[in-house]
Amino acid sequence: MKKNGTTGALALLIALVLLSVIVVPGVSAERDSIQVSLGTAEKVALESTQEISARLNEFSDWSKASVTLSQQCYDLEGNLTAYMFEVYSDGRYSGFILISSTTDKVPVLEFSKGRNPYSILTDKTDLEKQVQTISSEKEFTVEDPRNIYLGGTFYYIEYPMTDSHGMKQPSALVDIVRSKVFPSGFSPMEVPLELYEQHNLIEHEYHELAQKEWAAIIAGEGSLTITDPLSGYSGYISGIPAYYWYRGCSPTAAGMVLGYWDSHGYPNFPVGTSLINELANAMGTGSTWPFDGSTWPWMIDDGIMTVCQNHGYSGFSAANDYWMEWTEIKNAVNSQKPFVISMLHGGIGSGYSQPYGDHSVTCAGYSEFSTPFVNVWDTWDIYSTHYIAYGNWWGSMATWVNP
C-alpha cells in the first residue's frame, strides 16, 4: 500500500473474494435493523464524548462538551444512515462525532477533532459549479442537496434533478473526499455498486457486535456505561516503535511490527529506515506498476517472512488474513503481538479530517468504548496512536506475525 492508497490491488483482491461469497446459498444481505431515533442518537453522541474524554488524553476537553446536530446522512436510496453531530467545548467547535441511525452499524461510526467532512465542500465551490453546468446542459433543475454517507471514505453530496416537466431525473453526486463530480446516472463507487452492496456479507461479527451494543443502549434508554480502561474492555501493546511513512505504508507498518520484536528477544533486525528499506525490497514495493510506493497486498506476508529469514529467524510466521474478525484482533493484542492492518477505503481516524483511504497501519490495541475501536500507529504520526471504528472500511486484511 502507498501513503494514502493501494491503487486497485487490494480493491481487486477483495472484489474477487466478494464475488466468491455472492453465490453462497442461504446467505443474504438483508438484516433485521431498527431505526435509531434522533433523541437516542443525541444521547449516545453526548455520553460518548464523555467516555472518549475519559479514555483519551487528547480529547480531555470533551468531558463537558455539548453536541449539536449538523447533518442527517442518507444512502443512495434515500434511507437515513447516520447523524452527524458537531462537538463544542466552551462554546467553540472542537470536532465531530458520527452516530449510526440503524442498529446494524456500531453506535459510534467516527469521531475526530478535525473538520466535519461535509463542511469541507464549502472550500470547493468549483465542484458545485460543475453540478450547475451539468444541469444547464441537460436543462434540468437542481433540487435541494442531500448528504450521503455510505461508510468509510464514501462522503457525498447528492443533487437531485428534475426535468422541465417536473419529472425526477438521476442525481449528480459530489465526492467530497476525492473532489470529483459524477454526472447524472454515473456510479460514484470505485468498485461496482453491486459489490459494495454485498460487502456486508463478510461482516457478520461486526453486525452482531453492533446489534448487541444497540440492544444494551435501547434497553437502558440510551444510557452508556463509562468503564474502567483496565477492566478488560481495552488492550494495548507497549514498546512498538513509531515510524513515519517511508517508501510505502505497508513496509513502514511491517517495520514497526518487526521493530517491536527486535526489542523483545529478536535483536538481529535492523531498525528505522534500514529495516523499512529491506522490507520494501522484499515486498516489491513500488518496483513494478504503478511505481508509487504501492505494495501488492499478497506480498506483505511474503516480504516479512523473507526479512525474518534473512536475519536468522526462520521460526517466524507471517500470514495474510482477508477475514479479520474482532475476536482475532483482541486475541492478538492481549497476546502482545502487533500486526499489520491494510484497509480499503478506511474511514477517518480520531483527530483527523482526512480519511485513511487505502492504507496500511500497525495495530497497537483496541478499546470497546460504546463501540469497538482499533488503536493504531498509522505512519502519519509518531507521537500518538489513533482510533478507527472496527469495520469503518470497505474491506480490510490483517497480516499476523508470530515469532
Image: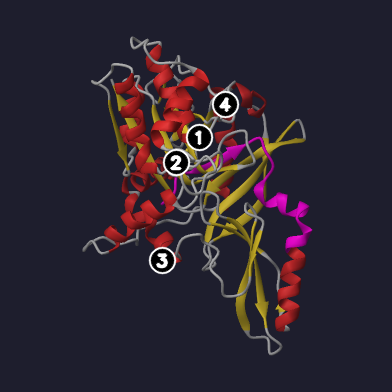
**Residue ID for mark 3:** 194
- In the figure, is residue 177 to the left or right of 106? right
Residue 320 picture location, percent across and down = 32, 38
Q: What numbered label is drawn on residue 249? A: 1
Mark in the foreground, 2 or 1: 2
Mark in the foreground, 2 or 4: 2
Q: Give the CA separation, mark 3 to mark 4.
A: 37 Å
Q: Is residue 201 visible?
A: yes
**Residue ID for mark 2:** 295
Precedes in sequence: disc 2 or disc 4: 4
Residue 154 picture location, percent across and down = 55, 54
Mark 3, secondary structure of its residue: helix
Mark 2, secondary structure of its residue: loop
* CB within 8 Å, label 2 to label 1: yes
Q: Image height check: is 382 above or below 96?
A: above
Q: Which residues are magenta?
A: 103-127
Magenta-drawn stretch contains 126: yes
**Residue ID for mark 4:** 244
* CB within 8 Å, label 3 to label 1: no
Q: Residues within 10 Å of mark 4 (few under 14, many from 20)?
A: some
